[in-house]
Image: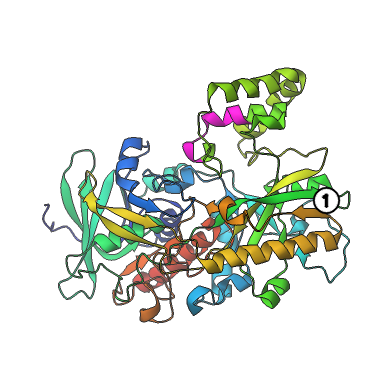
């Protein structure tokens, strides 16, 4: 084990080079501070190491992907596999959720960072409604209808944040980038009052060392942050931040699935549900949602829906373009090859032949489509987020993205086996609790009534099959070190500082007390900028 060097400590050591870690570093450079950015990976992935170190010793819970998927041990972190979706929380998402705990922060404090976060993530102006488009498409409907179709999600390029920031960060003298260095423990002073430093292992050489820092920020992702704190037991046997037994608990993702069929009428233009360019050239797409007033009145958790064509993997759709899209997916990262039902990445030969048969029946259509999609999805710097096909029959399956209620039984703990670096592997139990399931069903019942009342179409679903259709959004790891107003209710205070350890701070979706129904990247970037502001003022006066 490496000893403690005599070198002066860094002012701030940031662990993790994903969106949260890079957002903090980008705000602290140039302020007269000595900074360290520590990343366990390098510029290239080590897939074998990811499966060994980031995988779970055991995983339980219906429909949760393998624990190492949607995560990256490399510079840029999850931004290297991110799809680019950006949308803020609704104001009511910050209010009380399951267990009676909401966000102990004024939403306005967070929202003031939206312009900077949107610019950082390359998703354009922070405008998230229909007015962002050159030609807004609005619906004429009765004011009493509780359906809302004017909220849009915006899309990043998508941006690999390390590639974006590398030229400016690597040249800085006030920042030391330690790539390929895995943090194995956060070390407290003997009285447990503050962090003294970090134990590291160089993954290339195996050499172990000790790095001292006046302040430490853990920005390792919702799973890895909890794992590292639980494994840091030199002074506190229960782990750091686990004073009230909340660390690792309340693990949330988003609940996703194909929940029914939507048949649209001519009252809604096809372009309304397709990708469009905003005035500043960013791809955006309208969402189907219930109004805030409806959710508050009926006490519904948040949910949003997106129309989608038939599943591309099922050749029975007989659509030549969908078959071409499905075969092209074999070139994507494994996470995006998997369907919600866990369809195999490599279909059997008979399925491949069926898809080829679809393509050969309409070769002219496919030949005309391929150059366009090559330009939009591959060659363009700002890429079309995905392939959406407007259907002549106006029938679509409906994809749901729903809020999960925080539940202490949905959690991450440490296992008994260790990875090659000596770190305990995790045990992951994802729990789809009754409150979340009943909330999803109530949302769908309300949606069915509102789609018909609005005149835009019909929505058909079956309450008996909803639970089997639902699964976990594998890339959103939320709530494992939640923010709270009091130490007994969570892990970090409203500023993101671990209760009782004033120089240890957490960044990322781990600190979210509630999950909302949207991708967490934009919000966690806002929180990272907010934390960086606190640290900058504290350290520079």
- The residue that label 1 is drawn on is 135
Q: Where does residue 90 sit, x and y in percent of width and height?
A: 63, 68
- 220 to 512, vertically: above or below: above
Q: Where does residue 17 sit, x and y in percent of width and height?
A: 39, 50
Q: Is residue 391 left or right of residue 54?
A: right
The answer to whether residue 34 shows anywhere in this view is: no
Query: What residue is drawn where x is 47% and y is 61%?
Result: 252
Q: Is residue 314 left or right of residue 4?
A: right
Q: What range of the chain is rendered magenta?
A: 326-335
- 48 to 289, vertically: above or below: above
Q: Main secondary structure of the magenta part?
A: helix
Query: What residue is drawn where x is 84% and y is 57%?
Result: 138
The answer to whether residue 111 shows anywhere in this view is: yes
Q: Is residue 351 magenta?
A: no
Label 1 sits on a secondary structure element that is loop
Q: Where does residue 472 sit, x and y in percent of width and height?
A: 51, 53
Question: What colouring does the structure picture have?
Answer: rainbow
Query: What residue is drawn where x is 56% and y is 52%?
Result: 468
Q: 30 or 378, which lies in front?
A: 378
* Other residues around mark 1 within 10 Å, as few (<14) / some (14–19) / many (≥20): few
Q: Is residue 332 magenta?
A: yes
Find residue 357 and report its image quarter.
top right
Find residue 351 and report its image quarter.
top right
Q: Residue furthest front?
A: 464
Query: What residue is drawn where x is 46% and y is 41%?
Result: 163
State which quarter of the image contains the C terminus: bottom left
Q: Where does residue 306 sit, x and y in percent of width and height?
A: 69, 51
Q: 177 or 246, which lies in front?
A: 246
Please tell me how many numbered marks the rendered image carries. Answer: 1
Q: Is residue 345 left or right of residue 45?
A: right
């Amino acid at each position: 084990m490496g000893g403690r060097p005599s070198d002066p400590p860094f002012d701030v050591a940031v662990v993790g080079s994903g969106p949260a870690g890079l957002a903090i570093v980008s705000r602290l450079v140039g302020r007269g501070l000595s900074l360290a950015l520590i990343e366990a990976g390098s510029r290239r992935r080590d897939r074998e190491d990811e499966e060994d170190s980031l995988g779970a010793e055991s995983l339980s819970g219906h429909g949760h992907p393998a624990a190492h998927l949607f995560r990256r041990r490399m510079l840029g972190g999850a931004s290297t596999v991110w799809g680019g979706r950006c949308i803020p929380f609704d104001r009511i998402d910050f209010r009380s959720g399951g267990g009676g705990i909401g966000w102990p922060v004024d939403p306005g404090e967070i929202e003031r960072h939206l312009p900077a976060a949107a610019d950082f993530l390359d998703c354009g102006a922070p405008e998230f409604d229909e007015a962002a488009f050159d030609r807004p498409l609005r619906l004429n409907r009765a004011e009493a209808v509780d359906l809302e179709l004017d909220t849009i999600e915006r899309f990043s390029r998508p941006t690999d944040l390390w590639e974006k920031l590398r030229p400016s960060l690597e040249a800085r003298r006030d920042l030391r980038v330690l790539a390929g260095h895995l943090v194995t423990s956060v070390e407290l002073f003997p009285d447990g009052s503050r962090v003294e430093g970090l134990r590291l292992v160089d993954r290339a050489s195996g050499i172990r060392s000790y790095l001292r820092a006046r302040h430490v920020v853990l920005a390792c992702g919702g799973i890895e942050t909890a794992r590292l704190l639980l494994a840091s037991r030199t002074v506190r046997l229960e782990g750091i931040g686990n004073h009230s037994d909340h660390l690792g608990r309340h693990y949330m993702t988003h609940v996703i699935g194909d929940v029914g069929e939507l048949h649209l009428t001519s009252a809604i233009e096809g372009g309304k549900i397709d990708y469009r360019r905003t005035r500043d050239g960013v791809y955006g797409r309208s969402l189907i949602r219930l109004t805030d007033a409806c959710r508050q009145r009926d006490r519904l958790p948040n949910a949003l829906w997106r129309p989608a064509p038939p599943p591309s993997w099922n050749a029975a759709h007989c659509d030549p373009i969908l078959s071409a899209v499905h075969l092209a997916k074999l070139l994507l990262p494994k996470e995006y090859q998997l369907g919600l039902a866990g369809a195999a990445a490599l279909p059997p030969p008979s399925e491949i032949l069926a898809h080829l048969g679809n393509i050969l029946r309409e070769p002219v259509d496919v030949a005309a489509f391929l150059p366009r999609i090559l330009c939009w999805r591959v060659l363009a710097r700002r890429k079309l987020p995905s392939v959406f096909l407007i259907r002549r029959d106006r029938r679509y399956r409906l994809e749901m993205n729903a809020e999960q209620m925080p539940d202490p039984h949905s959690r991450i703990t440490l296992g008994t086996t260790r990875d090659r670096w000596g770190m305990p592997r995790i045990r992951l139990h994802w729990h789809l609790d009754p409150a979340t399931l009943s909330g999803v069903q109530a949302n769908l019942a309300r949606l069915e009534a509102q789609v018909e009342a609005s005149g835009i179409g019909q929505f058909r679903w079956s309450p008996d099959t909803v639970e089997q259709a639902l699964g976990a959004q594998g890339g959103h790891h939320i709530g494992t070190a939640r923010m709270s107003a009091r130490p007994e209710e969570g892990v970090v205070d409203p500023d993101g500082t671990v209760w009782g350890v004033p120089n240890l701070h957490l960044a990322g979706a781990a600190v979210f007390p509630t999950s909302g129904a949207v991708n967490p990247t934009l919000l966690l970037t806002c929180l990272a900028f907010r934390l960086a502001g606190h640290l900058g003022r504290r350290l520079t006066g």
